[in-house]
Image (cartoon, rainbow, N blue to C red):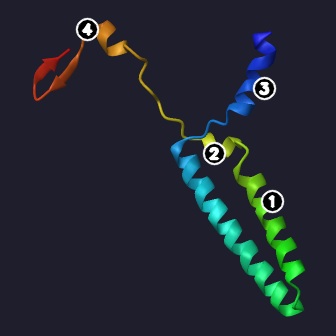
Amino acid sequence: MDDILAPIQDLFEGQIDFQGQRIAEILSTVLLVISGVIATTVGYVYQDIHLTLWIGLAGTLVTALAVIPPWPFYNQNPEKWLVPGAGRAAGTGIMVDGVKVS
């Protein structure tokens, strides 16, 4: 059962790395600014606030689709974390100013 659920769980966990967070932030800012400029321009040209709001909503939904799901390109540079307790098992300890601290 774990073999079946593991890919689904990975899909919904939403793991992205720090570089992916940066990309998502830049992408969301750019998409929202572009959709805002387009909505304002179209609304001004047609003198229709209703149209402006719908274009703004569509731009927000496109931005949400681009940023909220954990797309694979958001996790291309994963961090390599240390295994808990790995240093102690090997007996290395932590060195601070040349003194071993346990």
Q: Earlier in the sequence, mark 4 or mark 3?
A: 3
Residue pointed to by mark 1: 61
In the rendered view, would you say 72 is above or below 82? below
Quadrant location of the C terminus in the rendered image: top left
Viewer-side label of 1, 4:
1
User: Rounded to the nearest whole Å, what is the CA distance between mark 1 and mark 3?
Assistant: 24 Å
Residue pointed to by mark 2: 74
Image coordinates of residue 70 in percent, x first then y, are 70, 42
Residue pointed to by mark 4: 91
Residue type of the residue flagged with mark 4: Gly
Q: Earlier in the sequence, mark 1 or mark 3?
A: 3
Viewer-side label of 4, 3:
3
Mark 2 surroundings within 10 Å by alpha-carbon count, few (fewer than 14), some (14 through 19), many (20 or more)? many
User: Rounded to the nearest whole Å, what is the CA distance between mark 3 and mark 2?
Assistant: 18 Å
Q: Which mark is residue 8?
A: 3
Image coordinates of residue 63 in percent, x first then y, are 74, 59
Q: Earlier in the sequence, mark 1 or mark 4?
A: 1
Image-quadrant location for residue 74: top right
At x 23%, y 15%, the residue is 93
At x 74%, y 19%, the residue is 6
Viewer-side label of 2, 1:
1
Mark 4 surroundings within 10 Å by alpha-carbon count, few (fewer than 14), some (14 through 19), many (20 or more)? few
Viewer-side label of 1, 3:
1
